[in-house]
Each structure stands twice: as structure tokens, then as C-alpha cells.
Amino acid sequence: MKRISADDKAVVFQLSAREREAFVRILQTYPVVPPAHQPVSKELNNPRVAEYQRLLDDALAEQRAANQRHLHAWLAAPERFQKIKAGYRFTLERVDSEWLLQVLNDIRVGHWLRLGSLEVGELKPQDLDPKLLPIWLAMEMSGYFQMSILEALEG
């Protein structure tokens, strides 16, 4: 994923066909973080914690559903990926950059949680059960796309 231009409205990247396919496939896995992952409190003796937890879970579910709808429409936009000789041109409007980074972060963190929340140095693909390799790869690729976007936005 290589930045080819940027202005105050958008950043334009060049992706190979394989990068585009991986990017779209990873985005289509959203959401990955389990719905009940965000506890409202660790203080379980408060009688209102269950009510607050339900309110938080409902708000997060609504946000995830809205993000999914936006993501599907965003990916379906015909101008999103334009075929070029060297692969694809991908345009990311700056107004969508924070939202897309949050989606990618959910995917990365969700897969990290599925792998047992191990320290990064402990997550070596050769040590994982082969059934977990797709999860590890999705985590790593979503991190790669996050870093590529962040570097392009800053640079």
C-alpha cells in the first residue's frame, strides 16, 4: 500500500491486486471485538452495574451496526478502487480516515483477543496452532493497513 498523492481532502494509495483483495476481505470481517468485551465497571457489587452494562452494550451494538452499514456502502462505492495498470488506485477521504482506522483497530484487537491477548513478542506464527494462522494473519494485515494509512496521513 503506497501513498501516491495527498491533499487536504484525500489521500490516494496504490495497491496491488493482492493487497486490495486482502484489504477488502479484512474489512469484511468487521466487527471482531466481542460485544461484551467492554465492561462498564469492575465493581460488581453496585446494583446498577448490570443496567449500565446493558446500556453500554446496546450503544456499542448500535455503533457496530452503523459502522457495518457505512463500511458496506463505502466499499461498494465505484470510485473507491479504480483499476490502473499497476493494480488499483484507492482514495481515502480524510473525513473517513478516523472512522476507517477505528474499524481496522477493532479488527486487529478482536483477532488479538481471539489469540489469547498474548504479548506481541510472544505471537510467533511458527508457534501457533495452524488453525490459528488465519487469525494471526488478519491481525497482522489489519495492523499493516492501519500503519500505512497513519503514515500517509502524517506524511
Image (tube, helix red, strand yellow):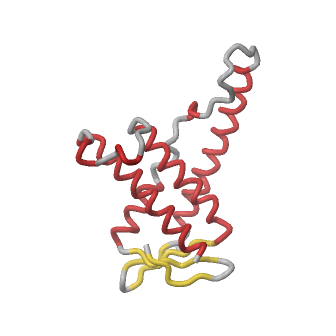
Numbered disc total: 0
- x and y, in percent, of residue 144 in the image: 43, 62
- Establish if 12 lies above or below 36: below
Say which residue appears at 52% left-offset and 35% top-offset: 34
Residue 122, by quadrant, is top left
Left or right of 114, for residue 96: right
Q: Residue furthest front?
A: 121
Residue toward you, 43 or 57: 43
- x and y, in percent, of residue 132 in the image: 30, 41
- Establish if 88 lies above or below 85: above
Say which residue appears at 52% left-offset and 64% top-offset: 76
Say which residue appears at 56% left-offset and 33% top-offset: 37
Residue toward you, 71 or 76: 71
Residue 44, by quadrant, is top right
Residue toward you, 58 or 115: 115
Q: Where does the N terminus fall, quadrant-wise?
A: bottom left
